[in-house]
Image (tube, grey):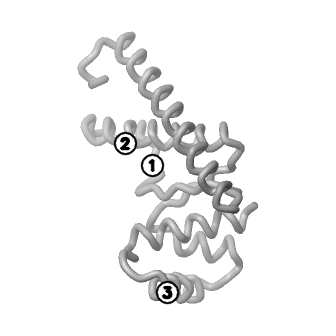
Amino acid sequence: MVSEQDEKRGMRLVRHTRDTATAEATRAIRQLMEQADQAGHRVRAAALVVGSDVDPATLRHPHIRAHALEGRLYREAVEAAASRCGLACEVLVEVEALPSAAVAVGKRPVEIKAATDAWGKALGPPWGAQEKAAALAAWVALARR
């Protein structure tokens, strides 16, 4: 764990982890893009749903800050990987997904909710909060392209 290392060694570990995570995410995104291409689809954007957009440096509790920094590291690795693959990456905070989607696509939140409910009925289970948030993020990413 980085917090248990001296600063120089800890920063090397963070850089190595970031670089490895970015390389693996790039590989995975390229693989998904190739699969989509083979199926006759074109990937036009990427989207991430995050629990929070709080700057980890503002968190006072060291344990909570460490988890937030780890989450930010992987989020930034995926964003960098998407960019390496030529994709713009939209980031939505989960609790703001519905209003953000409404603004992005020019509809009222009630219309957005009705659309996601209809998608869930059409697709069937599982269609929970994670699937709804991912669908909204994708819709926003595509609407902004």
Q: Residue at x 39, y 10 (%)?
A: 8
- Quick one: label 3 or label 1, which is nearer the N terminus? 1
Helix, strand or loop under label 1: loop
The residue under label 2 is 68
- Quick one: label 3 or label 2, which is nearer the N terminus? 2
- Quick one: label 1 or label 2, which is nearer the N terminus? 1
For mark 2, does the 10 Å Cα neighbourhood hold few (<14), some (14 to 19), or many (20 or more) residues? some
- For the residues marked 1 and 2, what is the alpha-carbon distance in whole angstroms? 8 Å
Kindly identify which numbered label has been placed on residue 122.
3
Helix, strand or loop under label 2: helix
Say what amino acid the circle numbered 2 marks: Ala
Which tag is nearer the camera, tag 1 or tag 2?
A: 2
Q: Residue at x 41, y 23 (%)?
A: 14
- For the residues marked 3 and 2, what is the alpha-carbon distance in whole angstroms? 36 Å
Image quadrant containing the N terminus: top left
Q: Nearer the viewer, residue 132 or 105?
A: 132
Say what amino acid the circle numbered 1 marks: Val
Q: Position of residue 108 (x, y in %)?
A: 62, 85
